[in-house]
Structure formats: C-alpha cells, structure tokens
Image (cartoon, helix red, strand yellow):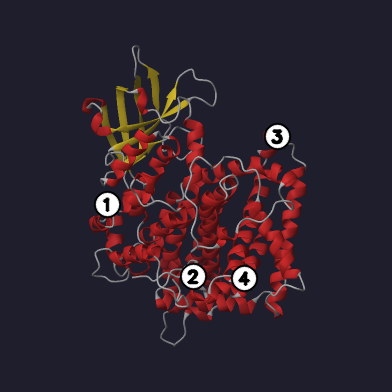
Amino acid sequence: MSPETCAAASPVEERIDALERAFGPFDDPANPLGADALLAADAAGRLPAKGEQVLDERELNAEFVPAELGGRLDRMDVLGRILRPVFRRDASLGFGYGLNCFFAAAPVWTAGDLDQRRKAARLLLDGRRIAVARHEVAHGNDFVRDEFTLTDVPGGGLLLDGSKSAIANASRATGLVVFARTEGAERGRSHSVLLLDRDELPADRVEDLARRTTTGMRSAEFGGLRIRACVVPESAVLGARGDGYELSLRSSLLIRGLIPSIVLAGADTALRTVARFAVRPRADGRSSLDVQMVRDVLTGGFLDLLLIDCLALVATRALHLLPRQMSAYAAAAAYLAPKLVAESMDEMAAVLGEESFTEDGAYGMFQKQRRDLPVTSLGHAGSAGRQVSILPQLPYFARYAWFADPQPPAGLFRPHEALPPLDLSQPVLLGDGDPLAATLVALTDRLESADAPGPGGAAGHALRFLARCLTSELADLKKAFEAVPLGDRAALASPHSFGLADRYTLVLAAAACLGVWREQQAVPAGRVDAFLADPSWITAVLYRLARRLGLPLPDRPGACERRVLDETVARLHTRRSFDLYGSPLA
C-alpha cells in the first residue's frame, strides 16, 4: 500500500504483508530466503526447504481452496496478489509448491460434484499436493507426445493405462487429475477427466518416471508417471464422460487471470535489479541514469508493469462481476502480459550489459527471472492458444458490442472494493458483449467534453489525443471484423486475423488502464494513491501503446515520463512493489 494511503490496512493487505515479511529481506546475504540462497538453490535444482516451511506455516494451500470448502479463496484478484511475494523470489517455489495445485484443482472446482470437491479440498488443506496430467495438444507445451487411455471394464469400472513424461510435482502429489483418451469416442468428446487419490491406487500399478531438466524453473520437479492397467471407479470422473476438452477450456477461465500476476512478480524483481544497477554511483559521481536510453528503459519497464496489473485486475474481478463477458479479458491478459515482459526484459538486458549473463552475485537474479519467464507463463504455444480463444468472439463484438455496449460496473477497476461471491457455474467460453471496450469509448468522450473536468496543459492535450486515436483503432477493428462472416474459421485462422487480435489486446489494455485511472478520481480520500490519480502515468502508458500500434502520436509527454521515472526510483529506495499497490517489501 502506498505511503499516501492513510486508512488502516485491510485483512487482505495484512495477509499479503505478513507473507512478504515471513520471507525476510531479499537482499540480506544471511537470509536463508534471500537472493543468494535462492540462486544457490536454483543452481542445485532444488526447492529451498525454508521456503516450503514458510508456505506451510502460512498455509498457502488454503488460498487455493474455495471458502465454502474450508479454504480462503473468495476473490480471484486477491489470490493473484497473494502469489506475488512468492513469485518475486522464486517461480519454482511459487509454481511447485502451490500454484500448480490450483491449476490441477481448477477442473475439480469447475465440474466436480460435492464429494469430489471435498476430497480435493481435504488434500490441499492437509498440506498435500495435487498434480495434473493434461491431454496431448498438437504443438502444445508437452515435452513429448504421450498420454493416458481409458476403457470400460466389463462388470463396472474403468481401466486407466498409459504414461506422461512431464508432470509438475508428479512424485510429490497425492491427488492426481488425469486427462485420459477414450478410444472410438466422437470428435470433441475424446477425453475424460479423473480425480484420483494416489494412496488409494495399487502401488504396483503406479510408477514414477525420471525427472526432466528444464532451462527455466530449475528447482521445480517435472517428472513422469506411468499407470499400468489400473482399474478406477466410475465415480472418479469429473463431470461426464467425454467432457475433457470443454473442461480444460472452462478451467482456463480461472487460470488465465492469474498469469499476469505471476509474470508481473518476476518482472518486478528484474526491474528492481536493473534499477539498482542504474542508480549506483560511479567513480566520477555519475550513474547510468544520466543516459537517456537507461531512463527510457526503466520508465517503460514500470509502465508495462502498471499496464499488466490493470489487465490482471480486470481479468480477475470480471470473473465475479462480468462472468458472461470475461473470457476474452482473461485470454487477452494471459497473452499480452508474458509478451510485454519478455520484450521489456530484452531492453533491460541492454542496460545491464554483460551483467545480464551472470547467474550469481548482485545481478544474478535478473538472469534467473529471465530464464523462468517462458516456463512461468506456460510457453509460446500457450500464447497462440489464448489468441485462438479470443478470435471467434471478435466478429460478434464488431457487429453487436463495440460502440453499442454499456460500460462495466465501476467496481471492475476498484481493487479495494468488495466483490460478489465467485460462482464458477456462470463464466462462459464465448462472451456475449465487450463492456471493457465501452470504457475506452466513454472515457474518450468524457475527456473531450467541455463540461467534464480533466487534466490541462500539454499532458491533457496528449491524453485526449491518444484516447481518440485508440478509439479510432477500435473503430478500424470493428470494420475489419464486420467483414468476417460469423463462424468463418478459415478467415479467423489467417495471419492477418491473428495480427488484428494482437491489436485488440492492446486496445483492451488501454481501456483497462483508463478505467483504473478514472476510478482513482472517485476513491475516498483515505485510500487515494496520489501517483495513480495523477494523469502522468496514464498519458505515458497510452503513448507507449499507441506507439506500439503505429498510431499517430502527439509530442512525446516528457514531463509525464519524468514523473513515472521519479516514482520508479522512489519505489526502489523505499522498497515498494512496482505494481498498482506499491506494497511494502521486506
């Protein structure tokens, strides 16, 4: 929480801050969970034992269990924030200890009956793990193509057979969520999903296979599992037989909104590492900050993190507030966040120079975060899959939603406002509207209205100009997708359509940022963040987005960018996070 926030910390903030403090100072060489110890554990390919102890003591698994089942999961935006103190330090720990358990449990929370949900909750609340063996997808994230098969057993039950060579936490998990193919099933119904307790399976039917080594997240265990002709009960099936493909897609609606938070957390550490390098004084009393390119990289890196966090906020809160429209937002956030961070890290590497290659010492954490990013964000194929899930919705939006839908509720952009209960029966795979895009249109009109108060001077002119250009981009997208017949898969599969989908995600990002900035004007005085209420960051963000899109640009908002750089350096020195919250760091 920023220094400007005067109100007492909420229970959520206290929970997040307590976890951060439990890890101790990141830059303390004597801290068993400091940077030096984490880099040593990463080099050895092992999870830091002290880290798992801290997460056990904080009962992190309870964060992944819905509140009605005895856990603490009642808000998806809060879950994203709670993961950040872990992923700022070590993606292997964050993923291997707990987040993979949430990924594995998502199909259970989505489609499991009450007994299955209670079973999964009991495993996690008892401190055990659940692993997921997903089905094979062509060009997917699997190391090799292998899978499980499922056949009927005469007299009752199902016969599970097969193997997977790359399962996170394969040997450490008690619970198993297994996607298995049913031979001869109709197209689209070829896979079913099982929830199994490994302790209940015959020991001679289950075999752990060799661990796979990875370039990123070296300490996380990616091992194999072979199950030989094992009879399992029909009651192990989640949902109905053949629901596997749909269940995978529905589960992704929960998972994708969390991706921005975890890549943002790693990028926070990378930016902090580079900023520390840039501000260090040299023998002549100068620093790297005297170089314009360095200032631009630090400013741009922070702006990207603010943009990503706005998308993270919208994607997670939309699960509660806009369940019938949120699928495109979750996919856009999960697609754009890793892409922006990867490009930002390339720019930051140029600032570090040869130090960007070191794997230990003061700047070794940058190399670790850069290696972890592709694994953390579920890889390049994951990005393509997210675009594929957006594309079928855009011709419909172009015809019926853009410039016609009402705006979303203001609570979508207010991180500290309460949310209605999470109802996982409500989210749908294809949205029936795009209210987030309506925010861009409405804010553009408001900024240009003579009656509406807004920023003045050069910054105000630039902000109005940029908002109008981005709204014009939405109008161009509308024309392009109106020309695509509804349901025309061939047209949507073209490289041109993929390029347009990329542009759409950038327009959504602009809308999310504008919504967050606007709602800061309505925040009670005790909770206002002076930086987020300032037009400097939103003007600089929109300039960066418009430049990326190749749109017409006003004069560069230099004063706005200097304000953002000042905030970047201030947060470095006052040990606060580079996101919307400015949370205190240990």
User: 572 above or below 250?
Assistant: below
Residue 264 percent coordinates (x, y): 47, 60
Cα separation, mark 3 vs mark 4, equals: 38 Å
Along the polypeptide, which appears first: circle 2 or circle 4?
2
Look at label 3 and name its amino acid.
Answer: Asp
Q: Which residue is mark 1?
A: 46
Residue 546: quadrant of the picture: bottom right
Q: Which residue is mark 2?
A: 351
Look at label 2 and name its amino acid.
Answer: Val
Q: Secondary structure at mark 2?
A: helix
Q: Residue furthest bottom?
A: 285
> Is the Cβ of the residue at disc 3 closer than 8 Å to that at disc 4?
no
Give the foreground label among 2 and 1. Answer: 1
Q: Secondary structure at mark 1?
A: loop
Mark 1 neighbour class, 10 Å CA radius: few under 14, some 14 to 19, many 20 or more: some
Cα separation, mark 1 vs mark 4, equals: 41 Å
Cα separation, mark 2 vs mark 1, equals: 30 Å
Along the polypeptide, which appears first: circle 1 or circle 3?
1
Mark 4 neighbour class, 10 Å CA radius: few under 14, some 14 to 19, many 20 or more: many
Give the foreground label among 1 and 4. Answer: 4
Side of 110 relative to 523 (left or right): left
Q: Which residue is mark 3?
A: 488
Q: Which residue is mark 4?
A: 540
Q: Nearer the viewer, residue 226 or 583?
A: 583
Q: Secondary structure at mark 3?
A: loop
Along the polypeptide, which appears first: circle 2 or circle 3?
2
Residue 226: quadrant of the picture: top left
Cα separation, mark 2 vs mark 3, equals: 46 Å
Residue 518 percent coordinates (x, y): 62, 67
Look at label 1 and name its amino acid.
Answer: Arg
